[in-house]
Image (cartoon, grey):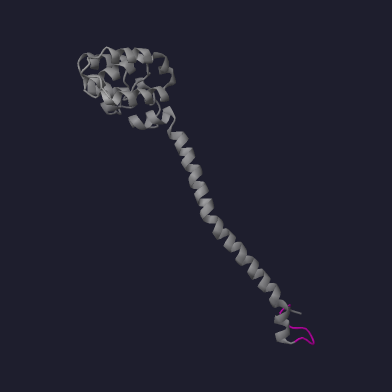
Amino acid sequence: RSPYVPGPGCTQQSHYASHQPISLDIMQMLAEIYSILLGMMPIAQEFYLFCFFCLGFFVFRTQAVRRLLLCGSCFLPGFGTPDSFGKHKGIETPSSCSWCSIEQLRSDFAHRRYEQVLEGWAKLEKYSGEALTLVVSALLALGRPEDIGLFVAKAAANLPHLRATLHETIACIAAAPASQVPRP
């Protein structure tokens, strides 16, 4: 016998009436599951977006990724160190992407190329107290003494090893002519 054929003494109507509460329960349960899933979708989507935001934030805050993005280098073998730029299979990188050394900062400062000293800070191979002092002196020479406080604060916060050399930077500011030091 087929389960859909009513048994003896059972009419077609009574057969469907006896199975209706079961199918109605199943439909209600499926509707509840569906509404729960629909309710969870935006939360799950926001959770994934939050997780990827945090992951991206931490990844892109690393020094290696910053330098990679700053210089626009490729994921090619031989790239990634200051000595290897432009040496891989004849590929040249723009001159603005080269690493900057403390000697280059000194040279730019000695030749009064103060803007290049400021640009060179972001591309330094190694940050030092001398480099910080050169950049502060360049800011003074450009007539931008109001930017020194914020710059030194950010440099000290992001590069804790420079905190020990802040006395050199302060001495540089103290030695500046009075006309270049901001007054409250």
Relative to the observer, which residue lies in front, 31 or 134? 134
Asked if residue 16 is positioned above or below residue 29 in the image, the reply reads below
Kindly give the residue lying farthest to the right in the view shown: 8
Could you tell me if residue 55 is visible in this image? yes
Residue 159, located in which quarter of the rendered image?
top left
Residue 80's image quarter? top left
Towards the viewer: 70 or 135: 135
Q: Seen in the image, is 155 located left or right of residue 25?
A: left
Q: In the rendering, at what x and y percent does residue 146 appear?
A: 27, 25
**Is-magenta flag for residue 109?**
no
Q: Magenta-highlighted stretch: main secondary structure? A: loop
Give coordinates of residue 155: x percent, y percent.
Answer: 37, 23
Between 39 and 95, the residue placed more toward the observer is 39
Tell me which residue sits at (22%, 19%) in the image: 180
Which residue: 62% across, 66% down?
Answer: 30
Can you say whether 41 is above or below 32 in the image?
Answer: above
Residue 49 falls left or right of residue 103: right
Image quarter (top left, top right, bottom left or bottom right) of the C terminus: top left
Range of residues picked out in magenta? 3-10
The answer to whether residue 6 is magenta is yes
Q: Is residue 165 left or right of residue 34?
A: left
Counting labels gives 0
